[in-house]
Image (cartoon, grey):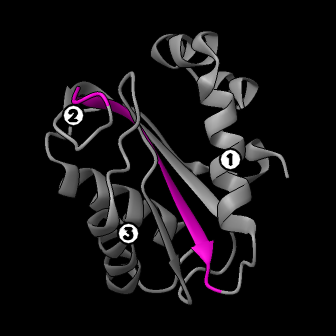
Amino acid sequence: MELKELLDESCIAMDVPLQKKSEVLDAMTESLYEAGIITDKKQFREAVEYRESLSETGLEDGIAIPHGVDTCVNRAAISYVRLKEPIEWESMDGKPIQHVFLLAIPADGDKTHIRMLSELAMMLVRKEARTALNQIQTRQELYEIL
């Protein structure tokens, strides 16, 4: 599985001026809905909120990977937002978040969920990849990182 294949171009936004976690998740859910990846925004947001209630999805160095597993997801996909300014988000290092990768996973996705998370985490472990996220200017540059 190639991460860039899961990232729909219409689900990428850079330097978005959102200031709250809920606004970020709403905007990303909307992009997944408009792209036809999910069929029900409310149901998907509930799945994401459920996952958020289990443990933090903020990693380190300003990156969060929230995700939702639900029957309203048509196909596995990733939405990406780079925020204009970092925002508060429960994270492993206690620091604000600026990069959000929202994973949408079908309920019958078998091991898709684990594979997506592990591949994304492996990519983000590389310091040069994390640094590059702050410098990209185009969607194509994001695809190259992935």
Q: From the viewer's perspective, is residue 21 above or below residue 69?
A: above
Q: Residue at x 53, y 77 (%)?
A: 38
Q: Residue 107 location, x and y as percent?
A: 61, 85
The residue identified by callout 2 is 17
Report if the CB atoms under discs 1 and 2 are less than 8 Å apart.
no
Amino acid carrying mark 2 in the image: Pro
Residue 102 among those drawn in magenta:
yes
Q: From the viewer's perspective, is residue 77 above or below residue 65?
A: below
Residue found at the far right of this picture: 1
Q: Is residue 120 visible?
A: yes
Classify mark 2: residues with Cα within 10 Å, few (<14), some (14-19) or many (20+).
Answer: few
Report the magenta residues as a range.
93-107
Quadrant in which residue 59 is drawn:
top left
Quadrant in which residue 144 is drawn:
top right
Amino acid carrying mark 1 in the image: Ser
The residue identified by callout 3 is 51
Q: Residue at x 69, y 33 (%)?
A: 122
Q: Nearer the viewer, residue 95 or 81?
A: 95
Helix, strand or loop for the magenta stretch, by majority: strand
Screen quadrant of the C terminus: top right
The residue identified by callout 1 is 118
Q: Is residue 82 visible?
A: no
Which mark sits nearer the N-terminus, 2 or 3? 2
Q: Residue 97 location, x and y as percent?
A: 29, 32
For label 3, the SS is helix
Q: Residue 25 location, x and y as percent?
A: 31, 58
Amino acid carrying mark 3 in the image: Arg
Q: Residue 98 location, x and y as percent?
A: 32, 29
Q: Nearer the viewer, residue 12 or 145?
A: 145
For label 2, the SS is loop
Residue 139 among those drawn in magenta:
no
